[in-house]
Amino acid sequence: MPKIFKENKFALFVANIVVISIWLIVIKSINQILLTDNLPFYIYYLGDLIRFVPPIWLTYYLWIVRKN
């Protein structure tokens, strides 16, 4: 982990927000391309899991596992 994140919690917070924002924008555009209206309901639930679980894992890793 870069030294700035160990010294500055605000930088870590901003980096976390930026990475999550980029992830959500990319996944939203991919979902709009791939998902159509005639899919089974569980495909939409899988799309939501792919959209929201990785940012939660990233936040958990950065703030709890690393214990900066």
Image (spheres, rainbow, N blue to C red):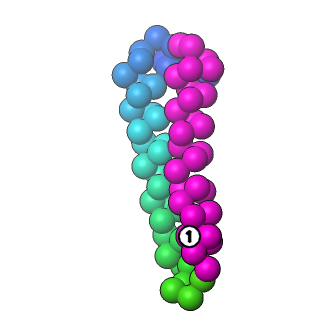
> How many residues crowd around disc 1 within 10 Å: few (fewer than 14), some, or many (20 or more)?
some
Secondary structure under the numbered disc 1 in the rendered image: helix
Relative height, residue 58 to residue 45 (above, below): above
- Residue at image coords 52%, 32%: 59
- Asked if residue 6 lies in the magenta stretch, the reply is no
Magenta residues, dominant SS class: helix
Q: Which image quadrant for residue 11? A: top left
| Residue stretch in magenta | 40-68
Name the kind of residue labelled 1 in the image: Tyr
Point out residue 53 in the picture as x, y percentages from the top left corner.
Answer: 57, 47
Is 56 situated left or right of 18 in this image?
Answer: right
Compared to residue 61, the image places residue 67 above or below, namely above
On the rendered image, what quadrant is the N terminus found in? top right
Q: Residue at x 57, y 64 (%)?
A: 45
Q: Can residue 15 be seen in the rendering of this structure?
A: yes
From the viewer's perspective, is residue 34 above or below residue 26?
below
